[in-house]
Image (tube, rainbow, N blue to C red):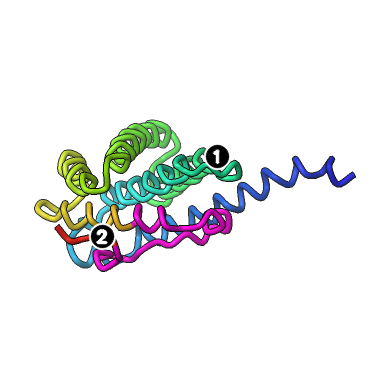
Amino acid sequence: MAGIWTPFLKPKAQRQRADALYRGLMTAALSPEAYAADVVPDDMDHRVQMVSLHAAVLVWQLTQRPDKELRHLPQLIHTRVFDGFDASLRETGVGDASIARKVRKMGEHYYGLGKSTAEALSRPAEERVAALEGILKRNGAATAGRELDLAQYLVAIASAFEMAAPEDFMSGGVPWPTFPATSIPGVAKV
């Protein structure tokens, strides 16, 4: 009898994992340190970019892991992020008629930035910061002249994730370094 119920419990457990990872992602992406240090302008567009960048690093790491239990989490993370985009637009007063168009535009940027970020993080460790810095400049994701600071922070997150145990991802308790994270071992300030 227990075997019959197991498939029904798994999706719920996966959603709970995704929710916990999403909460960590949002806490890290919206924490005030990078905004207060003027590394990232504090406006809606840049907050969306910070969520996109943090999600990209998390999804990249989940796709790098061989753990079977983590395979479906990227899609669940994407869904949670888009639900958040939709909710934030509604909270700012965007009407139903234009929500779909705005979320579609956010989605195009989200997936494009995510793909570029994943490609940069898949490079050898010594090339990651420079690759991310270029992406951040092209996308205007940081205050002009502060792209290096944000790139180093994103690499610090990726490094922390690479050192994390699979259980950290399964529990939703992965380490999200706070900004600035250049004091993390193995992440040198360039």
**Which residue does the image show at 27% across and 43% down from the upper left?**
124
Q: Relative to 6, is 164 above or below?
A: below
Residues rendered magenta in the picture: 157-185
Which residue corresponds to mark 1? 71
Within the magenta stretch, is there residue 161?
yes
Task: Report crowding for label 2: few under 14, some 14 to 19, many 20 or more residues within 10 A (C-alpha).
Answer: many
Circle number at residue 187: 2
Residue type at mark 1 is Arg
Per the image, label 1 sits on a secondary structure element best described as loop
Within the magenta stretch, is there residue 175?
yes
**Which residue does the image show at 38% across and 58% down from the upper left?**
160
Residue most toward the left? 145
Ranked by sequence position, the earlier of labels 1 and 2 is 1
Mark 1 or 2: the one toward you: 2
Hey, which quadrant is residue 98 in on the image? top left
Residue 30 horizontal/vertical position (percent): 35, 59
Q: How many marks?
A: 2
**Which residue does the image show at 56% across and 57% down from the upper left?**
167
Relative placement, left or right, of 123 versus 88 is left
Circle number at residue 175: none
Relative placement, left or right, of 58 versus 43 is right
Per the image, label 2 sits on a secondary structure element best described as loop
Residue 4 horizontal/vertical position (percent): 84, 40
Task: Report crowding for label 1: few under 14, some 14 to 19, many 20 or more residues within 10 A (C-alpha).
Answer: some
Residue type at mark 2 is Val
